[in-house]
């Protein structure tokens, strides 16, 4: 698999090299030189999830990983399902929260951890990543206890739910967590600064586990095939997929699936008040505003890192821009959507509710809607209970950590403070 840096076409990498580097030169994103097409999609959709996913990933990655190695990675990483639930006559939910940290990022995080542990050949690595909510838990659990890999997770202090926070700040061991006194965009900026600093990048053998890492992105492609496989055959070519969008890795993965031949009719990029992309799609002007805090906090991102990959898919002709629409859903309509879903017997949290609201008001005759449920409602228990007025129980992964103490260290939003902390903590 040949990947090219979208900011510097002279900077190319194999899959293994791109996984280990994370970012390319000038903070550029690695992206496939070519998106391979899959044949016999109908036959592929008849296969079980793990078997199909191995075939999809083999087509993307090529022969860089031995057959037995890729099989073992996928079997270990994808040890849980992604069921599709019907909400009403023409709208379905793809539930991506049945993994160990109850969020869609378990798929990418576990695939990356298994891949990196095999290709690093025992050499020390420091994973540095920022989280607006679910990434932190997925990455922490995926890498927890893996030898020679340390993980540093930055998160905006007080801006993610307490239960989300407890899932990754209570592990200890090789998992180090830092509460930054700023918003998520500031956390992302600190991560980029670290990758630009040779002392830290080389001295700590830095890597990133955000959705900018190509391994996480490719893993996410697989559950779009799983979603379509569960829908009625006669409706598969009329599916409109609504993706709750923050950093836009999830939408990118869906578009790669479509580029490979999966019969997705079109996409909706559903955002909260941080609506840089919906405004851009309407006006043609890229005009990020200051990040606004919302109840759908994992999407509180005003400068999404993965957008250049979507631009690349469109510019190279793999995706017609006309099949992508942006939709902003404000706080009031987010809560209304949660209540509407509850009235239909489906309990949801704010992120999925935004995607539901966007698609349920945009379907044309003959189309069916599929919205992504990216996190278990209990991860946003306080918000869900306040909006719906009903108590919800905690699943075991959350109940187990609810009473644990956070091990996170508080730091100001300055690179100097972060560098000093990381070097003192991890420098050999």
Image: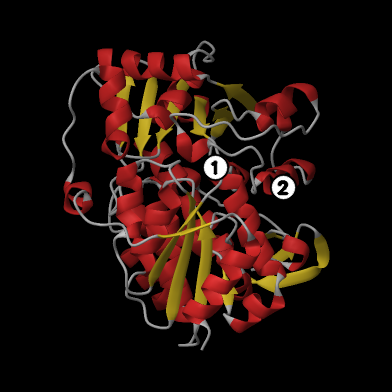
Q: In this view, does 290 lie to the left or right of 170?
A: right
Mark 1 sits on what residue?
Answer: 254
Q: Which of marks 1 and 2 is in front?
A: 2
Viewer-proximal residue among 174 and 11: 174
Residue at (49%, 20%) from the top-left corner? 359
Numbered tag placed on residue 224 in the rendering: none
Q: Is residue 331 above or below residue 321?
A: above
Q: Is residue 97 above or below residue 128?
A: above
Q: Is residue 111 left or right of residue 167?
A: right
Residue 235 position in % (x across, y down): 44, 25
Q: Quick one: SS at disc 1?
A: helix
CA separation in Å, label 1 and label 2: 15 Å
Classify mark 1: residues with Cα within 10 Å, few (<14), some (14-19) or many (20+). many
Q: Quick one: SS at disc 2?
A: helix
Viewer-proximal residue among 185 and 333: 185
Residue 77 position in % (x across, y down): 35, 62
Q: In this view, does 66 lie above or below 260?
A: below
Mark 1 or 2, nearer chain start = 1
Q: Locate residue 20: give its quadrant.
A: bottom right
Residue 186 position in % (x across, y down): 61, 49
Split into 4 quadrants, where in the image is the N terminus? bottom right
Viewer-proximal residue among 390 and 84: 390
Viewer-proximal residue among 5 and 335: 335
Residue 410 position in % (x across, y down): 45, 58
Classify mark 2: residues with Cα within 10 Å, few (<14), some (14-19) or many (20+). some
**Residue 357 in sight from this viewpoint:** yes
Residue at (50%, 50%) from the top-left corner? 221
CB under 8 Å between discs 1 and 2 = no
Q: Locate residue 364: give its quadrant.
A: top right
Mark 2 sits on what residue?
Answer: 308
């Amino acid at each position: 698999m040949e990947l090219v840096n979208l900011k510097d076409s002279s900077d190319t990498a194999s899959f293994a090299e791109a996984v280990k580097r994370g970012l390319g030169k000038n903070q550029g994103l690695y992206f496939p030189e070519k998106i391979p097409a899959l044949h016999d999609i109908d036959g592929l959709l008849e296969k079980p999830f793990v078997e199909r996913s191995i075939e999809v990933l083999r087509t993307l990655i090529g022969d860089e990983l031995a057959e037995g190695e890729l099989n073992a990675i996928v079997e270990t990483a994808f040890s849980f399902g992604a069921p599709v639930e019907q909400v009403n006559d023409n709208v379905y939910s793809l539930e991506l929260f049945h993994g160990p940290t109850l969020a869609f990022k378990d798929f990418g995080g576990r695939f990356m951890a298994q891949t990196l542990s095999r290709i690093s050949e025992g050499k020390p690595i420091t994973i540095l990543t920022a989280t607006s909510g679910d990434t932190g838990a997925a990455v922490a659990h995926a890498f927890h206890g893996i030898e020679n890999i340390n993980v540093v997770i930055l998160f905006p202090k007080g801006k993610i739910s307490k239960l989300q926070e407890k899932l990754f700040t209570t592990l200890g061991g090789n998992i180090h967590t830092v509460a930054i006194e700023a918003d998520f965009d500031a956390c992302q900026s600190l991560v980029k600064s670290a990758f630009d600093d040779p002392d830290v990048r080389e001295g700590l053998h830095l890597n990133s586990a955000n959705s900018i890492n190509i391994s996480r992105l490719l893993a996410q492609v697989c559950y779009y095939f799983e979603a379509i496989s569960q829908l009625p055959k006669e409706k598969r070519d009329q599916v409109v997929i609504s993706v709750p969008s923050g950093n836009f890795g999830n939408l990118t993965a869906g578009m790669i699936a479509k580029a490979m031949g999966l019969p997705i009719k079109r996409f909706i990029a559903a955002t909260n008040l941080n609506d840089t992309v919906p405004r851009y799609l309407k006006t043609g002007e890229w005009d990020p505003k200051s990040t606004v805090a919302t109840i759908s906090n994992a999407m509180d991102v005003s400068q999404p890192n993965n957008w250049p990959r979507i631009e690349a898919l469109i510019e190279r002709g793999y995706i017609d821009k006309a099949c992508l629409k942006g939709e902003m859903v404000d706080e009031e309509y987010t809560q209304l959507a949660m209540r509407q879903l509850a009235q239909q017997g489906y309990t949801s949290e704010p992120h999925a509710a935004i995607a539901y609201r966007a698609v349920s008001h945009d379907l044309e005759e003959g189309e069916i809607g599929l919205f992504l449920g990216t996190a278990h409602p209990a991860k946003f228990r306080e918000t869900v209970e306040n909006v719906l007025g009903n108590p919800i129980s905690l699943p075991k992964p959350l109940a187990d950590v609810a009473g644990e103490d956070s091990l996170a260290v508080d730091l100001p939003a300055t690179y100097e403070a972060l560098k000093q902390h990381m070097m003192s903590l991890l420098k050999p």
